[in-house]
Amino acid sequence: MEITQKINLNPYSILLTSSVGGSDTNWRNKLLGESILAFQCIKQADSQAGYSHAELITVKYGNTFAARWRTREREPKKGLLAYVGSKILIAEPINCSDSQAAYNDTKAMFDGDIYPVWRLLLQGISAFIFPWIVKIGYGSHGVCSEVVAYFLMRAGLRTYWRGTTPAMLEDEIRQSGSKYRIVFEGVFKGNCDRGIYSSTILGRCKS
């Protein structure tokens, strides 16, 4: 049974997606997403990883800040609406210390960076040997989930950011009901009326 459900977006919510840049994206984004998903499946204890990409929703209309091939803030059409037709999960952090300040720090740290492919390679290596290697790094270099993890660390919800994968964020969201509230999970249809999104729920939804 299909149910249409309003999605109440709040700034600084976490967006997890099953692809990088949506289902109709270019081949480079598809390759990036498939590579991340493969490495995660190897690293996860249960060999399961439902999401390959993470972004931070910055405005309730669907703007996002994310590391794709370049880290920057994107308008709704290239942000949340890029994932129409894709499976997504939106989770709202609870009791952040100062979300605006945390985002300002995150943007100052990563804005304009070119995607650090070498950090993705480190995650690939860590899937087989030397799991500690993913915590090696310097400066403002972070893959998509590390950028989101940095925001969460600055907001007081995590203690580290390097080495974080989308699957790790998903596990934390599902296992820590005191820190996160799942707003939506399912195939995103992208219906919008006066700034309020709604979608046909094919997965599950909480509001």
Image (cartoon, rainbow, N blue to C red):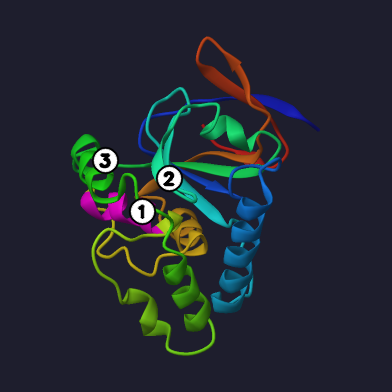
Q: CA distance from mark 3 to mark 1?
A: 10 Å
> Which residue is tagged 2?
66
Residue 204 or residue 54, whichever sits in front: 54
* Quarter of the image with the N terminus in it: top right
Q: Quadrant of residue 22?
A: top right
Judge whether 188 appears above or below 155 on screen.
above
Residue, x 63% and y 26% (percent of image)?
A: 190
Specify which label sits upstream in the sequence, 2 or 3.
2
Q: Residue at x 44, y 71 (%)?
A: 118
Residue 119 relative to residue 190: left or right? left
**Residue 147, label in figure:** 1
Give the image location of residue 112, x and y in percent. 34, 45
- Examine the structure image and report whether residue 23 is included in the region drawn in magenta: no
Whether label 1 touches label 2, CB < 8 Å: yes
Identify the amino acid type marked 3: Tyr
Residue 101 location (% of width, % of height) = 18, 39
Q: Residues within 10 Å of mark 1 (few under 14, many from 20)?
A: many
Q: Circle 3: is it few (<14), some (14-19), or many (20+) Cα within 10 Å? A: many
Q: From the image, tell me which residue sits under label 3.
A: 103
Kindly identify the amino acid type of the residue bearing the numbered disc 1: Val
Give the mark nearest the N terminus, 1 or 2. Answer: 2
Question: Looking at the image, which residue sits at the far top?
Answer: 194
Q: Which residues are magenta?
A: 146-154
Mark sitting earlier along the chain (3/1): 3
Pick whichever, 3 or 124, lies toward us.
124
Contact (CB < 8 A) between labels 3 and 1?
no
Label 2 secondary element: strand
User: In 3D space, how far apart are the residues under numbered discs 2 and 3 (Cα atoms)?
Assistant: 12 Å
